[in-house]
Image: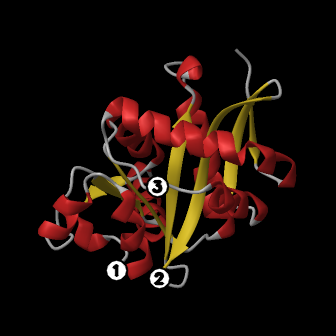
Amino acid sequence: MKFQILFASEDHVKYAEEITQAMEDAAKARGTGIAKRSPLYISDKIREGKAVIALAGTSFAGFCYIETWSHGKYVANSGLIVLPEYRKGGLAKLIKAKVFELSKKKFPKSKIFGITTSLAVMKINSDLGYKPVTFSELTTDEAFWKGCQSCTNFDILTRTGRTHCLCTGMIYDPVEDVQNKQKKTKESV
């Protein structure tokens, strides 16, 4: 199957309802938590230029969006979804790579992070340069943590004072990445 992986635009707002339903269905099917988002919220992300969509022809196949926290110090890649009929073919990896590119382009100095319960997403994030971190290394922005309230695992997060959950936190730090690349260049000389 050939996909178009695009920076979402106004033309893609029409998929907002389908995207939110797909997110909810996936969370129910996996029995895992996911912060629920409304079609209006997804439409806003698309209009703000903070989303990536995958299309199979003219049909919605997958999606992911970005959010900023702590006055742009942190960027989260969130809401990754691939419809069941398009899974296990590498589409999630393509979407994550595109939203990672968008995040670095729009917010070049920001740390990019995500929280997930999905081993596949952890592997994709790791391949992109993310490192697992404790929740204390994520944003302290209350608005971010408020977004977790609709997750079925929110009680775990609150009981532990936001130190533990079923999700794994992962961060890509652009400063650390540059330093590592400089170090590798010096070692190879």
User: In terms of sequence position, does the residue under pointer 1 or pointer 3 come before the other?
Assistant: 1
Is residue 160 rendered to the left or right of residue 8? left
Q: Kindly report which numbered mark, 1 or 3, lies closer to the viewer in this rendering.
A: 1
Rate crowding at label 2 as few (under 14), some (14 to 19) or many (20 or more) other CA atoms within 10 Å. Answer: some
Residue 62 numbered tag? none
Residue 19 in percent (x, y) is at 63, 42
Residue under the point 29% across and 71% down:
137
> Label 3 near label 1: C-beta < 8 Å?
no
Looking at the picture, which amino acid does disc 3 mark? Thr
Q: Nearer the viewer, residue 131 or 70?
A: 70
Q: Gap between marks 1 and 3, in whole Å?
A: 34 Å
Residue 103 in percent (x, y) is at 61, 61
Label 2, secondary structure: give it.
Answer: loop
Residue 33 in percent (x, y) is at 33, 47
Looking at the picture, which amino acid does disc 1 mark? Thr
Figure colour scheme: secondary structure
Residue tagged 3:
185
Q: Quadrant of the N terminus?
A: top right
Residue tagged 2:
70
Q: Quadrant of residue 54?
A: top right
Label 3, secondary structure: give it.
Answer: helix
Residue under the point 40% across and 39% down:
27
Q: Nearer the viewer, residue 6 or 129?
A: 6
Residue tagged 1:
140
